[in-house]
Amino acid sequence: MTNQPTRTAVRIESIDLIRALTMVLMIFVNDLWSLKDIPEWLEHVAPGVDGMGLADTVFPAFLFIVGLSMPFALANRRAKGDDDRTLVRHVATRSLALLIMGVFLVNGETINEQATGIQGHVWGFICCFSFILIWNVYPKGVHRNWALATKLIGAALLLCMAIRYRGGGDGHLQRFAPQWWGILGLIGWSYLTSGLITIFAKNKVYIILMAWTIFCILSMVYKAGLVPESFSFIPEAIRGGTLVGLALGGVLSALIYDHYRALQDGKNLIRMLLLFAAILIILSFITRPLWGLSKLGATPAWLFLCSAITLLGFLAIDQLVVKRGAARWLEFVKPAGTDTLLCYFIPYFAYASTILLGLHVPDLLLTGIAGLFKSFLFALLCVQLTKVLNRAGIRLKL
């Protein structure tokens, strides 16, 4: 396999579609908390249990897709004239934005509403509203001063909330702090590490393969308790190896895909990606007896199996949907793949609005099959609201 970089500025439709479907699934499983009498296999597996539910596959799939899209995104920026220094600044800036968002949202999970004077759902609403003010890409007709003013308002809102925040129990109030960084923060650390590696690897497959191998080994070493305490200053999302391993697995898959795509060698493209998926599944079986299969434990078996599942999903979409002209059937979910962050924020607004307006969903729609149908429709509604907001000039870009 040659080590030439991705050749042209391009957007891979298959990646947009699998990202969109993953976001729909994420909103769906995140809404399962509101339901009762639903199959256990749909939900997260309890801490300490060796196993995996559908909900446990969504976050790793998203991390893998972050890596899958990275070589093409960086190639697009290089095609526009960005050098390595500019790319590093871009990756660092996006990572910082994700860390900020993650910290604010995760603090909402432990907020002391009485001490802070803000209800938990209102906290999430204000956070997401502020994020949109700061990171919205305003249409060309909007005056620069107006755009700058809205960004400053958003930043001021976040600052005031951070100062006012109190979390924990009444006897042990805590100030605003990173805690565990939140989902977006974990993505931020993983994106930063895998992004920097991808930039300096310049799409050389052997470097990415070596980096992926190192972080997979690090995942095992960390679960074995062999990482020295002296490295505790490094965020766990990085020193744990698993999350970065997921993202780098996506980068490696993208380079394999791009190589055979450029050669127009569809047969070997499928064979190589299926081979990689098979290797991942075998590694999962080998490592599961040692540390179990667990999302909350971020075990190596979870890393390998979820990487394989996502890779096979991507390959299926690429070959069965896009290559055979059936992508139009998934057009209605595409906004979740092109403005994923905005789509992710929609449920925060929905939940807060429901509570503030005193709306109640009938018990019939919160139980069993009817409840699952409700949650699925809710996920699709969030996608359509994203599309409406995009048309209204609200589009997030970090």
Image (tube, helix red, strand yellow):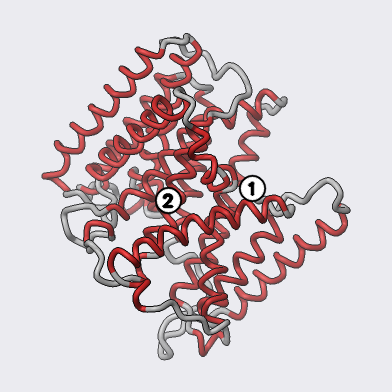
The answer to whether any part of residue 354 appears in the image is yes
Which label was assigned to residue 342? Answer: none
Q: Earlier in the sequence, mark 1 or mark 2?
A: 2
Viewer-side residue, 303 vs 195: 303
Q: Please give the name of the residue rendered at 41% of the width and 32% of the height, measured from the top-left corner.
A: 317
Q: Position of residue 379 (x, y in %)?
A: 47, 57
Q: Please give the name of the residue rendered at 41% of the width and 86% of the height, measured from the top-left corner.
A: 169
The answer to whether any part of residue 98 appears in the image is no
Q: Of the residues shown, which amino acid type is indicated by label 2?
A: Ile
Q: Secondary structure at mark 1?
A: loop
Q: Position of residue 161 (x, y in %)?
A: 62, 75
Q: Please give the name of the residue rendered at 69% of the width and 71% of the height, measured from the top-left corner.
A: 157
Q: Position of residue 374 (x, y in %)?
A: 40, 64
Viewer-side residue, 301 vs 35: 35
Circles 1, 2 touching at the beta carbon (< 8 Å): no
Q: Position of residue 217 (x, y in %)?
A: 27, 36
Q: Secondary structure at mark 2?
A: loop
The residue pinned by badge 2 equals 234
Q: Of the residues shown, which amino acid type is indicated by label 1?
A: Leu
Q: Is residue 216 above or below residue 291?
A: above
- Spatial separation of the CA atoms under disc 1 and disc 2: 24 Å
Label 1 crowd (10 A; few <14 / some 14-19 / many >=20): some
Q: Please give the name of the residue rendered at 79% of the width and 48% of the height, measured from the top-left corner.
A: 139
The residue pinned by badge 1 equals 398
